[in-house]
Image: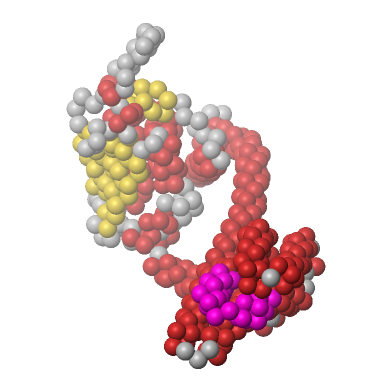
Amino acid sequence: MTTSNASDAREEAASRRRRVAAQRVRDARDRLTSASGTRPVFDYELMRMFAQNRLSASLVVLLLVATVGFMSSLWTGAATAGVWTAGVLIIHAVMITKCRQFLATPPAEVNIKAWRIRFILLDLFFGLAWMFNLVHPVGVSDNTGTFMLFVMLLVVAVSSMLAFSLPIAVFASTVPVTGAVAINFMLKGNLHDYILAIMAITAQGYFLLLAHRLYSSALQTLQARAEKDMLIGELEQAKTISDEARHRAEAANISKSRFLAQMSHELRTPLNAILGFSEVMKNEIFGPHAVAAYKDYSNDIHDSGQHLLGLINEILDLSRIEAGRYELNEEAISLAHVVHDCHHLVKLRAKNRGIVIHEVFEADLPRVWADERAIRQIALNLLSNAVKFTPQGGEIWVKVGWTASGGQYFSVKDTGPGIPEEEIPVVLASFGQGSNAIKSAEQGAGLGLPIAKSLVDLHGGSFTLKSKLRVGTEVIVSIPPERVMAALAPLSEPSPALQPQIPFERRDASQSAAGKAAD
């Protein structure tokens, strides 16, 4: 188990490394084929964000242009301010038209490089238009420095917020304005204007840094969304594969059940004839055999047929349990009586091998609500395994009592060779056999413990197997407290009278007779 877990961990780590390496290769290939150094799909998303920002702020830019044009008319006159306002509005209208055209174009038909150049040129023209307004016409007056700096800050702030998803466009729309205003201040040659020039350059640097932070944040958001979409795709693919595997497993399970049902009929029909005629022959009903060895042969044939019939029944029981079609016929039963009956059925076989079986039953145990046939099969499987693997002269303890939680339990403990700890999951699996079972002369099909555990699970109980090499094995079957009759709520309607129970002595005698007849 430890080796298997380590192997699985190594395979999972290797698979994770392969996925990371493949992702890095895809990222590198995308960066090489992209004009901006990011994935092509990110380039489109960033351009779409740029266009949407321009469209959403079109009214704000319109009001800003109109306001600055009106204020500029106070220094330059209405004609000059009107020409400048019209020019800026034309550039703005072209920008809005191109943004709508870009958003209306299907992503598969978009030429990212061409559209990037268009948007950068439009932003450059937009910035140059603001530069002409701030440098030449307004610069005639000596009292316009504060106005120039204020307008420059507005233009740089608005352009940085709208074009942050296209960093080159931010430079194209803001650097001409800031550069012209700073140069204009420095050409005046006094300290006050030098300070204003430094403030303009500092503000430009701040807004460029802010635009870069916004760009990085938008890029990280796109990457996180892409990783989420990729993870969702992988999960959907894994779910599809899992569903297909489940459908195949269900189809295989149905085919197996049909096969077992058909084969059970085909095998039981001749087995009934074999068991019937071999029993007639071994009992010499039609007269003694001419050769005495024929009677022994008849006994062997009958015993082998019984073994094969039991094996077929076990396979069918396990198939019904795995398919979820095993129905419990529940009733009020005495757990101690059922275990005691099973003890009597295996007592003769244990006595022949010199094995002593001890019973330790707690007194006055209430009945439990369970399937008697299933509980009997569990007890017989556990007792048969204990007798099979306990050496001659060994001992077996059978206990029935209360659990700490208020339920009931029964356990079977032997002094056999024990099971290695790493083989316990093997013996609990269908057709699984431990090393001691393989070496034993009385090999089985490896279905006794899996069937017992599955029947216990159907009752909502617990199945615990403890074993130690050269010490022995103990199996504990616990019935949950809600199945104990004393813990059940009283019925709201009167129940019909129960049939009278067979006395314990008569029950033991009948079961012993049935066991001898079966043997």
On-image quarter of the C terminus: top left
Task: Tell me which residue sits at (65%, 81%) in the image.
Answer: 136
Vertical relation: 239 (above or below) 203? above
**Colour scheme:** secondary structure
Q: Nearer the viewer, residue 70 or 23?
A: 70
Direction from residue 214 to residue 245 in the image, left or right: right
Residue 10 coordinates in the image, percent (x, y): 46, 73
Residue 177 coordinates in the image, percent (x, y): 61, 79
Residue 119, located in which quarter of the rendered image?
Answer: bottom right
Q: Is residue 137 magenta?
A: yes
Q: Is residue 9 magenta?
A: no
Task: Tell me which residue sits at (69%, 76%) in the image.
Answer: 129
Task: Tell me which residue sits at (24%, 47%) in the image.
Answer: 395
Residue 427 coordinates in the image, percent (x, y): 41, 54
Note whether residue 116 is visible.
no
Residue 69 coordinates in the image, percent (x, y): 66, 67
| Boundaries of the magenta span | 129-156
Vertical relation: 291 (above or below) 511? below
Vertical relation: 96 (above or below) 207? above
Main secondary structure type of the part rendered in magenta: helix
Direction from residue 332 to residue 157 in the image, left or right: right
Note whether residue 5 is visible.
yes
Task: Tell me which residue sits at (36%, 22%) in the image.
Answer: 332
